[in-house]
Amino acid sequence: MTQHQRCPCLSGDTYSDCCGRFHSGAALPPTAEWLMRSRYSAFYFGDAQYLLKTWHQLTRPESLELDPEITWRRLDIVRTERGGLLDREGIVEFTAHYREDGIARQQNEVSRFLKVDRQWYYLEAAPEGLASK
């Protein structure tokens, strides 16, 4: 992907003006939703290092192997709760569309995020009770 192509997170911006600046370390995602979008784009590009770097240390695995057979197609943000510039916690519900073995599939998740020292981190998929809100 060139820097001038649309970002995989479908924000409408170019990759360089969107998730590319977070992936390169030039900026930090300012909200939980922007972290979610940048993590989706990292899955799209197979950037396990960025995913681990943005995963909270309490729940981060030691390593992460991404399946190269999965092709990420689209991200839909369903809702957000908190996760803004002045918040310390946030929730982002999303649907990520992908293809695996030629079959269209979806991953639906309500994700929890925490901000530590002005940086957002993915914490975990929320328990089922939060998912039904």
Image (spheres, rainbow, N blue to C red):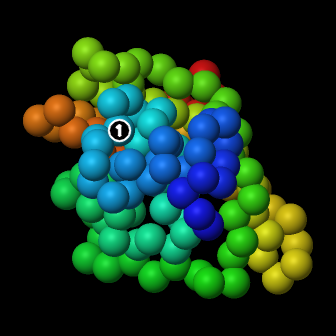
Between residue 33 and residue 13, name the one nearer to us.
Answer: 13
Q: Is residue 70 visible?
A: yes
Q: Residue most toward the left? A: 117
User: Which quarter of the image is occupied by the N terminus?
Assistant: bottom right
User: Image check: 119 left or right of 78?
Assistant: left
- The residue depicted at 53 percent of the width and 24 percent of the height is 80
User: Image check: 64 left or right of 74?
Assistant: left
Between residue 89 and residue 77, name the one nearer to us.
Answer: 77
Between residue 3 and residue 33, name the one nearer to us.
Answer: 3
Res. 85 image quadrant:
top left
Q: In this figure, which residue is indicated by the disc labeled 1?
A: 29
**What secondary structure is found at the residue carrying circle 1?**
loop
Rendering coords of residue 127 (x, y %) = 48, 41
Label 1 crowding class (10 Å Cα cut-off): few <14, some 14-19, many 20+? many
Whether 124 is drawn above or below 52: the answer is above
Whether 56 is drawn above or below 33: the answer is below
- The disc labelled 1 sits on which kind of residue? Pro
Rendering coords of residue 11 (x, y %) = 62, 36
The image shows a total of numbered marks equal to 1
Rendering coords of residue 119 (x, y %) = 22, 39
